[in-house]
Image (cartoon, rainbow, N blue to C red):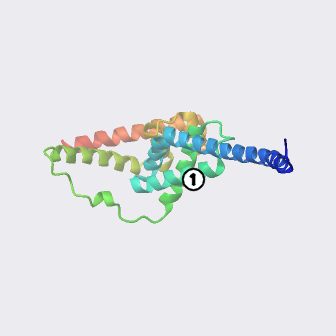
Amino acid sequence: MRTAVHRRMDMAAQVTGPTLRWQETATLAEADEFTTLETVVREHARFVFKVAYGVLRNSHDAEDVVQEVYLRVHRAGLKDVQDVRAWLARVTFRLALDRQRRPQGVELDAIEPLSHGPDAEHLAIQRQRVEQVQRLIAALPEELRYPLVLSAMEELNSRQISEVLGIAESSVRGRIFRARQMLKEKLSALSEMKR
């Protein structure tokens, strides 16, 4: 026998049923959004860091840019983005440029003592070579340096670089070629000076 109390409970269940389903749907949508964000972070975090580091040459600043990029991904979402990698590169590149324009402090990497391990001399020579190449790349004009960094270090193709920089693909290829030629000439001149 159904009592009035049972009927009221049934009615309450019917009223709250769709509400719970809507809440469950909203929770599922949020879970999907976080899953998407987690997937994007997992797949592209290293790439985004490399783009930021390619511009900034400072790991701490690059990490800050990576965080800002993923905050923007979280806020804006990726629904209308066709090429996620190119979009991330563009956002990262622009944020890194903005950060680069800010006044900079002392870089902590320069203060760290050298390793006193058995290969200290070899490590020092290797570090000098890397720093020398980085200085040569940094000395390139921006119009040549940025396409080179995005191509060689961030492994973007010319179409993606053209989207990031807002220039034609043919210009991207030409600038990369000129940048490599300049680096080759400078490196050969430096090696001749050491002889």
Is 103 left, or right, of 160 in this rendering? left
Residue 38 percent across, percent down from the top left: 54, 43
Q: Quadrant of the C terminus?
A: top left
Residue 106 percent across, percent down from the top left: 35, 64
Is 60 left, or right, of 87 in this rendering? left
Q: Closest to the observer: 83 or 175?
A: 83
Question: What's the residue type where badge 1 is placed?
Answer: Leu
Residue 130 percent across, percent down from the top left: 30, 45
Is residue 179 at least partly visible in the picture?
Answer: yes
- Residue at the (39%, 41%) spot, across then down: 182
Q: Which residue is mark 1?
A: 71
- Residue at the (15%, 51%) spot, across then down: 116
- Tag 1's secondary structure? helix
Q: Quadrant of the N terminus?
A: top right
Residue 33 percent across, percent down from the top left: 63, 44
Q: Closest to the observer: 163 or 193?
A: 163
Q: Is residue 172 above or below residue 8?
A: above
Is residue 58 at least partly visible in the picture?
Answer: no
